Amino acid sequence: MNDNEQGLTLVDALVEIAKSDYPHEWARYCQLAPILEGKSGRSPEEDARTRLGRIGRYDSSLAWVSGGQELCEAQTIQEKLLDCFISAIRAGRCSLAGFNAALQPVSIPSDLIKAKAFRFNLSEMYVGDTRIVGVRVKLGLPAVQNEAPGRKPGQASPKDRASKAVLAILDNESERPRRGYGRMAALARMVQKTLPELPHKQNSIEKMIRMTVTEWENKNPDK
């Protein structure tokens, strides 16, 4: 019997979906994790798995990270991977089961699952006020290659369009907002004006462009 027949732990399932759907982001996360974890003696992927297990928990060991750029980038990738995991569950690509307080087996309806419900390091979660332990995930269908309803092959996703728009703004000295607090919000508002057809709210656009902006700032520290 293979691992998927028995069910994967929450961290293992999150990693498998990350590798499948966002291989480049996962590879980058494995580069960042050893920087943030310090000299742990673990492999880069083991460091990455350890950090994913702490999603949703405050980790005081992160405070020393110089400049906070690595931490910011890692958190952005974590949010993306977690959103992908939730989407995969709701799309029926995987199913979850575990045990309640009486150690009775229970299946977990996908429509009741929320991102903040997971305790990845313990492989447990909460559904409302009910604690589910020993959670196992069975993977099913692969990702469907159309990120938005009705999107045609080759058509840019909203995230790609927003990223392209924000890069054009950042490269334009006369339009680019000053570096500092509030820059991300200002850029998101400018993207909204550039792409009025996008139905997303400002905070959603900020999430879409965060990684692109962070990478651009890392390459252009004086701008």
Image (tube, rainbow, N blue to C red):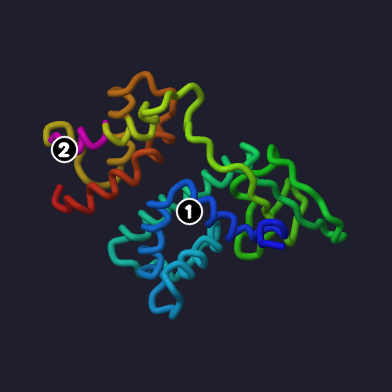
Farthest residue in the top direction?
197
At mark 1, the secondary structure is helix
Asked if disc 2 and disc 1 are in contact, CB closer than 8 Å, the reply is no
Judge by depth and name the residue closer to the eye, 27 or 186.
Answer: 27
Judge depth for marks 2 and 1 and give the one in front. Answer: 1
Question: According to the image, label 1 marks what residue?
Answer: 19
The residue carrying pointer 1 sits among few (fewer than 14), some (14 to 19) or many (20 or more) residues within 10 Å by Cα, namely some
Q: Main secondary structure of the magenta part?
A: helix
* Position of 110 relative to 71 (above/below): above
Report x, y in % for residue 152: 43, 24
Q: Nearer the viewer, residue 164 or 131?
A: 164
Q: Is residue 8 visible?
A: yes
Which circle's residue, 2 or 1, is located before the other in the chain? 1
Is residue 125 shown left or right of residue 207?
Answer: right
Label 1 amino acid? Lys
CA–CA distance between discs 2 and 1? 32 Å
The label shown at residue 171 is 2
* Amino acid type of the residue tagged 2 in the rendering: Asp
Asked if 173 appears above or below 123 in the picture, the reply is above
Above or below residue 34? Residue 26 is above
Secondary-structure class at tag 2: loop
**Which residue occupies 39% across, 30% down?**
158
Is 142 part of what is drawn in magenta? no
Image quarter of the N terminus: bottom right
- Position of residue 180 measured from the top left corner of the image (x, y, whole percent): 25, 47
Question: How far from the left and from the top, in percent, is residue 128?
Answer: 73, 46
Residue bounds of the magenta highlight: 165-172
**Could you tell whether 35 is left or right of 99 in the image?**
left
